[in-house]
Every structure is written in C-alpha cells, then in structure tokens.
Image (cartoon, rainbow, N blue to C red):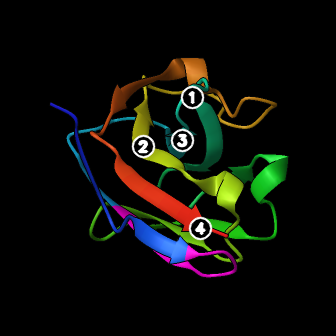
Amino acid sequence: QVQLAESGGGSVQAGGSLRLSCAASGYTSSCLGWFRQAPGKEREAVATIITNGGSAFYVDSVKGRFTISQDVATNTVYLQMNSLKPEDTAMYYCAASRGRIYCGGRDLGMPEFGYWGQGTQVTVSS
C-alpha cells in the first residue's frame, strides 16, 4: 500500500523559504512529485523526480527557486522553496506515479500520478 505523508508547510513572507518533506512508502513508482492547488484553481504540477536518484523536472514558474530532491535511504522527498511569492500560496501535495512513466514534459506527467498525500498548506504573504 502506497503511503505518502507531507510535512513542513506554513506561513512565510514573500522572499522567504520553506522546505516540504514527504515520507513515502510502499511504492514501486518511477516518479515522485510535488503538486499544488490554490483556492479556485486547478491542481498543477510543481516538480517531479525520477526515483532512486534520477533527473528532476520543474514547471517554468518555479525554476531557479524550487529544488526537489530525494533521500533514497529514508524514502523521503523534499521540496526546497526559496524566494517565495504570494502566488505560490496553495495546498501542496506529494504524489507517486502509477508504475513506470515519464515525468517530464509540459505537465510533468501529472495525469499518471495515482497516489496522493493529504497535503500541506503553504501561505506566502506580501
């Protein structure tokens, strides 16, 4: 059974930083990722990573500010978020793909992510 548990959300001022963590277990996925959903908006991809030390992918709006990484030993995926902006405010979700997929491309393979955590709220004030 795939289990994903996010932590590390909170409230910060614009320009600040947060690090999200996702404890993952029970997966055989090729990709893990972070996604977000703001009130009244559709869920969108943020960053994905090929498991076991593979490549990382980002949407344009977070490139250069966010970094996704994985600690393979502990099965933990991180999202380091720097230079946060008010438009980054959203519920952030950790997710695992259904089996082996390509998690690059325009939407970072989001439709193929079938396992989701409960989410952690990030609020950035101006």
Q: Nearer the viewer, residue 29 or 106?
A: 106
Ranked by sequence position, the earlier of labels 1 and 4 is 1
Identity of the residue drawn at 81% across and 51% down: 61
- Whether residue 109 is visible here, answered yes or no, is yes
User: Residue 77, image x and y in percent?
Assistant: 42, 61
* Crowd around label 2: few <14 · some 14–19 · many ≥20 (10 Å): many
Which residue range is magenta in the image? Answer: 13-21
Ranked by sequence position, the earlier of labels 1 and 3 is 3
Identified by mark 1, the residue type is Arg
Q: Nearer the viewer, residue 1 or 47?
A: 47
**What is the C-alpha distance between the residues marked 2 and 4?**
20 Å
**19 in the magenta segment:** yes
The reply to whether the C-beta atoms of the residues labelled 1 and 2 are less than 8 Å apart is yes
The reply to whether the C-beta atoms of the residues labelled 1 and 3 are less than 8 Å apart is yes
- Label 2 sits on residue: 93
User: Residue 104, image x and y in percent?
Assistant: 73, 37
**What is the C-alpha distance between the residues marked 1 and 4?**
21 Å
Give the quadrant of the N terminus.
Answer: top left
Identified by mark 4, the residue type is Ser
Ranked by sequence position, the earlier of labels 2 and 4 is 2
